[in-house]
Image (cartoon, coloured by chain):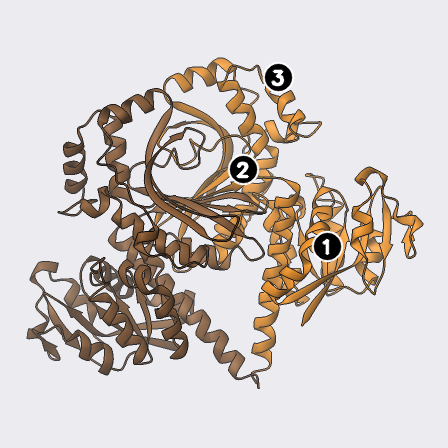
Chain colours: A brown, B orange
Amino acid sequence: MTRYDLSLIGFGGVNRALAELIAERGDALEAELGFALRVVAITDLRAGSLVRTDGIDLAPLLAVAPGELDLSVLPGGSRDPRNEWVVKEVPSDIVVEATFTNPEDGQPALSHVCWAIEAGKHVCTTNKGPVALHGPALRELAERHGVRLAFEGTVMSGTPVLRTAREMLGGLAVTGFEGILNGTSNHVLGRLESGLTFADAVAEAQSLGYAEADPTADVEGYDVQLKVMILAGEVLGTRLTRADVPCTGISSLTPEDVRRAAAEGLRWKLVGSARRRPDGTVEAKVAPVALPAEHPLAGVAGPTNALVLHTDLLGAITLGGPGAGRTETAYALLSDIIGIHAARSAALTGAGRG
Amino acid sequence: MTRYDLSLIGFGGVNRALAELIAERGDALEAELGFALRVVAITDLRAGSLVRTDGIDLAPLLAVAPGELDLSVLPGGSRDPRNEWVVKEVPSDIVVEATFTNPEDGQPALSHVCWAIEAGKHVCTTNKGPVALHGPALRELAERHGVRLAFEGTVMSGTPVLRTAREMLGGLAVTGFEGILNGTSNHVLGRLESGLTFADAVAEAQSLGYAEADPTADVEGYDVQLKVMILAGEVLGTRLTRADVPCTGISSLTPEDVRRAAAEGLRWKLVGSARRRPDGTVEAKVAPVALPAEHPLAGVAGPTNALVLHTDLLGAITLGGPGAGRTETAYALLSDIIGIHAARSAALTGAGRG
């Protein structure tokens, strides 16, 4: 039985949820998927780090409340996250990167991803920054080192949009896309329709756990901007910079705008979109759009996300699902690992062919 | 370069559209997909049949209007469709079955599929009957003969629902599904909302080419019933008979029902659904349902279809797209051929490994 040793970089909600999946369902997943998963390292800014090359027993760690976890008291533990050392030096097959990202330069996630690739390890990450800002360079680096870089969780959490676009649409041309790619802003727009003020709607989204303490990236569209850049690379094969994706958020809308539109059967949605122009270049943007009721995105409610892919042979294909959530994003990492396993199996059988 | 020789059984709208794709885009598809396609036989109830083991030149056939095509005047042609002989005896790699089906016994499509499998040929079909009524037996037969049976086009035409359910959701449990799986009835319901009578809405659907001359299977839900049976097999691993899927159509709804619901923010939709009960058995049905606006299927308009898959880790995943159309269904056949190629490539490299 194949086994993959994992280093979990960051032990916040997402990697903790992945650890829970492995601890609770590892045997069932092994039976279904044909490989076993073992965690050999965990690093975290607050909890410190833990390295056990013979495998970490996850259950006792998961029994401790997230804020109280102190890995330094355990054998193999340290108060220091030791991210660089763990990624580069601790033997593992896959580095699972779920820390945080600075949307200006993609750090520190970018370094974690590069170190892993250069150490010959596969990487999956939920961080948009490295992929949006440096996707083609990272892909090339991964190819040169013979490893896979996977990032399903960067767009619509575990909803399989990137894999569907890559693997399910052979023989089709995708000519563009439009998506509701941020659950917080979508929830806020829905609550404006119900009569809440902008501030109250944002506060509610925060209390429901959808919005960050600083909701700027959500409501001003910067989060969607990065996702449009990632999708443009994956779906249209185009590299876009942030300057290529003009971005208007929803804070410019008044509750009156939203209610008046709703009365006319229109729904304001924050839409990230891109389309290939006849000359082959790509036009992209993030902006609020008042959609007619029959538009496939008009009915997408609350924190749900959806992406419409425009294709030549099938017209519009829509994929909807959760846009966030710790378990949902942890599943994205699991689906990345499944993809790494499939590629590795194909390469192994291919290599054995000669 | 791998090449697949195809026998097209039935040369109505769908297989003709596939022939158009091959004639117009064959080289581009070959460059993208890594295999070439060549048609070596065509059979049709009205046009007769044509066999050219060195490859049929498609362009001249496609230049003739569908109703006027007479294959018997061509070298290798016959007035007789010769389906059985072509499927069994003419050398080909893949039999592409797009004739018609009797929903009671699945014939004549069922025989075409069985003959092909028993002759050691892969099959793709757009016919619901054989798969809905005899799916597990056909799958077993295909396995025994070492060939693939593919049928993406039986549900939502080329929208990749069956492949997504099979290949994109590893590690998840699908607990049920609900779908709008018939474009004609969905179009009719939308027009009832707009104030048309039932008869006028059906007549309009017929004039737009959505509805058959006899719309019974569409409006009474029998078409959706077969699709629910196919999906239950693929998504929930359960074999259902027609008796297991109680079926109510939309003819029982009055325009007043529909308009009154719309005034309350509800949308009547014909929903085909199935869910796994706690005891492991599956409950399925086809029935009109008044959906609240926030339901993922409420906004699915006109001839568009959509399927919601309920999963344990991701909650609801929705896939929407065309439910019918000749090019859209021809793409389903192409996607089946892509899947056959992928499986064959994996088997070849695997076999070469020893």
Tag on residue B80?
none
- The chain letter under disc 3 is B
Q: Quarter of the image for the N terminus of chain B: give it.
A: bottom right
Q: Give the class, few, some or many, for how many residues have Cα within 10 Å of label 1's Cα (few <14, many ≥20).
A: some
SS at badge 2: loop
From the viewer's perspective, is the residue at label 3 or at label 2 nearer? 3
SS state under label 3: helix
Q: Position of residue B40 (x, y in %)?
A: 80, 60
Question: Which chain letter matches label 2?
Answer: B
Q: Does residue B71 lie above or below B188 as drawn?
A: below
Chain-order first, disc 3 or disc 1: 1
Q: Along the line of sight, which residue is nearer the eye, A223 or B190?
A: A223
Q: Residues within 10 Å of mark 3 (few under 14, many from 20)?
A: some
The reply to whether label 3 and label 2 mark residues of one chain is yes
Image coordinates for residue B136, horizontal then vertical, percent: 60, 54
Marks 3 and 1 in Cβ contact (< 8 Å): no
Q: Position of residue A78 (x, y in %)?
A: 9, 76
The residue at the point 12 percent across, 66 percent down is: A45
Dot 1 falls on a residue whose secondary structure is helix
**For mark 1, what is the residue?**
B23
Identify residue for label 2: B181
The answer to whether A144 appears left or right of B342 in the picture is: left
Q: Is residue A344 above or below residue B213?
A: below
Q: Amino acid at mark 1?
A: Ala
Residue type at the position of mark 2:
Leu
Chain for numbered disc 1: B
Numbered label attached to residue B200: 3
User: Amino acid type of disc 3?
Assistant: Asp
Residue B296 vs B31, above or below: the answer is: above
Instruction: Answer left or right for A289 relative to B330.
Output: left
| Pointer 1 and pointer 2 on the same chain | yes
* Residue under the point 43% across and 35% down: B297
